[in-house]
C-alpha cells in the first residue's frame, strides 16, 4: 500500500470515528439533560459504541496504516515530509492505537457500562447526601482504573498513563512539582487577601428570577460570539460542554447554587469551552479528530480565561453592570460598580470547587490530585474517602464540609472513571495567565473588553489557538502562542496584581 493510500484510508476511519463519537455525545447529552429513565439500556448503548470505536483503533489494520505512514514511539506524527494536518491526525491515532491495543474490547465495554450506570448512582447519592450509595460502584470504578493504568504501562508512577490521556506529554512528577509551588503561592496570597478586610456580598444571595438570569447570561454569551446556529444551552446537575456534531455544540448550566453570579460564570465558563470547539471545527479540521482542543488543560485555559480573567474584570463589568442593574433594579438598588466588583471577586475558602474564587480554586484541585493518587495506589480505601476529603479540606483551605453533598460527592468526574482529569483544571489557569500576557502584547485588552465588542479578543484567540484544534502538542502550541514554555509565575503575578495590588 502506498503512503497516499494509507493516509486516505486513515482519514476514512477517522471520519467514522468522529461520527461514532458524536452519536455517543447525543446519548451522553440525553443522560445528563433528560430524566433518568432507561439508564441501564443507555449504559449498554454507550458501552457498545465504545467497544466499536475501540475495535477500530486497536485493529491490526490501524497498526499497519500507521507503520506505512512512518509513525513510531519516537516519531508519533509519522513522516516529517507530511503537512501539519496529516501529522496531527497520525499522532492522534498512533497514541490512541497504542493505548487501545493494550485493552481488550470486553474490558472497554465493561468500563463504559459501569461508568454509564454509575452516573445515575452518583446523582442520587449527591441528591440524598448518602455516600454509601455511591461507594460500591466507585470501588468498582477505581479497580477498573487500576487495571487500565497497569495495562497502559508506566515507568515510574501509575498515575502517569492516566494523566497522559488528558494532558499529553505532562508527567505526574511535573504536576507534583508545579503543585508544590502553587500550594505555597496560593496560601500566601490567600493570607494576604484575609488582611484586606471583610467584603459584603449578601446582595448576591437574594431572590433573582431564573428567567431573567438566563436572559442576561444569553446576552453575555452572544457578546462572546457563541453561535446559536451551531450551539445550544441547557440545564443539568453538573455544567458541561459536549459536541454532538461539527455544528452542534451544546453547553449546560445549573440554577441550584445560592449566588446569582454562579450560574452566570458557569455559563461563561462552558461557553469558553464551546468557543474552542466551534473554532476548532473549520475547513481544515472539520469532521476530523483534530476538531477538538490541544489538550484538556488548553481547553480549560479558554474557559477560565473567559470566566475569570475577562468575566470577573472591571473592564467587563464597566460595560455589563448597567445592564445587570436593568434586569435586577430592586436587588442592586444600593449597589455600585465598586461594591459589585468586590463581591464577585471575594476571596474566601468554600466547599464547592466550581464556585471557588480564583485564589482558592487551585487548592481544590491539589486536594483531588492527592486523593486520586492515594486511591490508585491503594493507600486510601474508597470507604475512607469522605473522611480523607474532609481532612484535606481542613489542611488546605481551613474548612470542613458540613455534608458529603458539598464535599466528596460534589463532582461527577470519578463516576466517569476520569482519574487524571482534575490536574488539567489547575494547569489551565497557568496556561490562561500566560496566554493573557501574550494577548496583552498585541491588544489593549482592557479597552477592548470595556467596549463590549469582544471580536478582537475572539479573533486573536482564533488566530493563535482555536483554528489549530488538536493539530499540535499542547507544549508546542503554548510556545507558538506565547514564545516560551509553561511558566507558573504568570499566574502568580496575575493574582497578586488583581487581589493584592502588586505591581
Image (cartoon, rainbow, N blue to C red):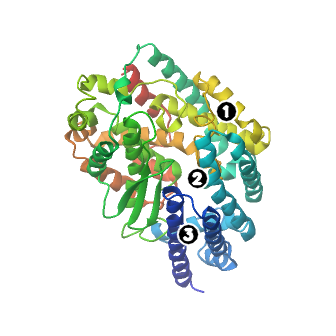
Is residue 488 at all visible to an observer of this figure? yes
* Left or right: residue 22 compared with residue 51: left
Looking at the image, can residue 437 be seen? no
The spot of residue 114 in percent (x, y) is 69, 59
Residue 129 is situated, as x and y percent measured from the top left of the image, at 62, 38
Give the spatial CA distance, label 1 vs label 3.
41 Å
Tell me the crowding category of disc 2: few under 14, some 14 to 19, or many 20 or more residues within 10 angstroms, Cα based: many
Q: Residue 480: x and y, percent?
A: 43, 51
Q: How many marks on residues?
A: 3
Of 71 and 49, which appears nearest the observer?
A: 49
Residue drawn at the location 50% of the way across and 68% of the way down: 22
- In the image, residue 304 above or below residue 104: above
Question: Could you say which disc has been placed on residue 389 in the image?
Answer: 1
Sequence-first disc among 2 and 1: 2
Q: Which mark is residue 90?
A: 3
Q: Which residue is mark 2?
A: 166
Q: Quarter holding the N terminus? A: bottom right
User: Observer-nearest residue: 434 or 399?
Assistant: 399
Amino acid at each position: 500500500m502506498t503512503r497516499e493510500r494509507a493516509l486516505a484510508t486513515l482519514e476514512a476511519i477517522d471520519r467514522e470515528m468522529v461520527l461514532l463519537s458524536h452519536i455517543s455525545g447525543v446519548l451522553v447529552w440525553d443522560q445528563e439533560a433528560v430524566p433518568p429513565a432507561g439508564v441501564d439500556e443507555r449504559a449498554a448503548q454507550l458501552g457498545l459504541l465504545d467497544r466499536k470505536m475501540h475495535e477500530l483503533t486497536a485493529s491490526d489494520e490501524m497498526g499497519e496504516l500507521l507503520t506505512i505512514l512512518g509513525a513510531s514511539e519516537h516519531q508519533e506524527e509519522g513522516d516529517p515530509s507530511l503537512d501539519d494536518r496529516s501529522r496531527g491526525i497520525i499522532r492522534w491515532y498512533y497514541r490512541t492505537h497504542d493505548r487501545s491495543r493494550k485493552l481488550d474490547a470486553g474490558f472497554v465495554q465493561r468500563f463504559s457500562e459501569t461508568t454509564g450506570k454509575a452516573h445515575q448512582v452518583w446523582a442520587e447519592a449527591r441528591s440524598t447526601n448518602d455516600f454509601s450509595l455511591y461507594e460500591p460502584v466507585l470501588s468498582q470504578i477505581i479497580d477498573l482504573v487500576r487495571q487500565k493504568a497497569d495495562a497502559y504501562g508506566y515507568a515510574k508512577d501509575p498515575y502517569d498513563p492516566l494523566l497522559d490521556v488528558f494532558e499529553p506529554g505532562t508527567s505526574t512528577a511535573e504536576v507534583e512539582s508545579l503543585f508544590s509551588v502553587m500550594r505555597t503561592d496560593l496560601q500566601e496570597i490567600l493570607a494576604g487577601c484575609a488582611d484586606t478586610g471583610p467584603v459584603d456580598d449578601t446582595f448576591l444571595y437574594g431572590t433573582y428570577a431564573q428567567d431573567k438570569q438566563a436572559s442576561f447570561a444569553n446576552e453575555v454569551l452572544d457578546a462572546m460570539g457563541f453561535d446559536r446556529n451551531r450551539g445550544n444551552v441547557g440545564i443539568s446537575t453538573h455544567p458541561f460542554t459536549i459536541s454532538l456534531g461539527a455544528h452542534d455544540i451544546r453547553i449546560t448550566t445549573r440554577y441550584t447554587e445560592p449566588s446569582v453570579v454562579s450560574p452566570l460564570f458557569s455559563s461563561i465558563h462552558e461557553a469558553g469551552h464551546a468557543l474552542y470547539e466551534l473554532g476548532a471545527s473549520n475547513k481544515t479540521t472539520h469532521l476530523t479528530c483534530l476538531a477538538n482542543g490541544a489538550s484538556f488543560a488548553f481547553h480549560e485555559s479558554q474557559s477560565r480565561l473567559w470566566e475569570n480573567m475577562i468575566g470577573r474584570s472591571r473592564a467587563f463589568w464597566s460595560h455589563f453592570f448597567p445592564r445587570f442593574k436593568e434586569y435586577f433594579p430592586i436587588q442592586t438598588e444600593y449597589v455600585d460598580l465598586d461594591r459589585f466588583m468586590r463581591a464577585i471577586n471575594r476571596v474566601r475558602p468554600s466547599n464547592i470547587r466550581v464556585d471557588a474564587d480564583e485564589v482558592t480554586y487551585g487548592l481544590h484541585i491539589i486536594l483531588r490530585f492527592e486523593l486520586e493518587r492515594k486511591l490508585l495506589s491503594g493507600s486510601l480505601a474508597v470507604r475512607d474517602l469522605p473522611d480523607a476529603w474532609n481532612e484535606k479540606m481542613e489542611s488546605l483551605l481551613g474548612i470542613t464540609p458540613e455534608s458529603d453533598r458539598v464535599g466528596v460527592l460534589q463532582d461527577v468526574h470519578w463516576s466517569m472513571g476520569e482519574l487524571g482529569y482534575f490536574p488539567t483544571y489547575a494547569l489551565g489557569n497557568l496556561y490562561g495567565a500566560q496566554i493573557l500576557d501574550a494577548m496583552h502584547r498585541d491588544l489593549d485588552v482592557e479597552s477592548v473588553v470595556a467596549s463590549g465588542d469582544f471580536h478582537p479578543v475572539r479573533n486573536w484567540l482564533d488566530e493563535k489557538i482555536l483554528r489549530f484544534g488538536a493539530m499540535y502538542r499542547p507544549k508546542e502550541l503554548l510556545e507558538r502562542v506565547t514564545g516560551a514554555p509553561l511558566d507558573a509565575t504568570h499566574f502568580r503575578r496575575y493574582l497578586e496584581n488583581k487581589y493584592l495590588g502588586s505591581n
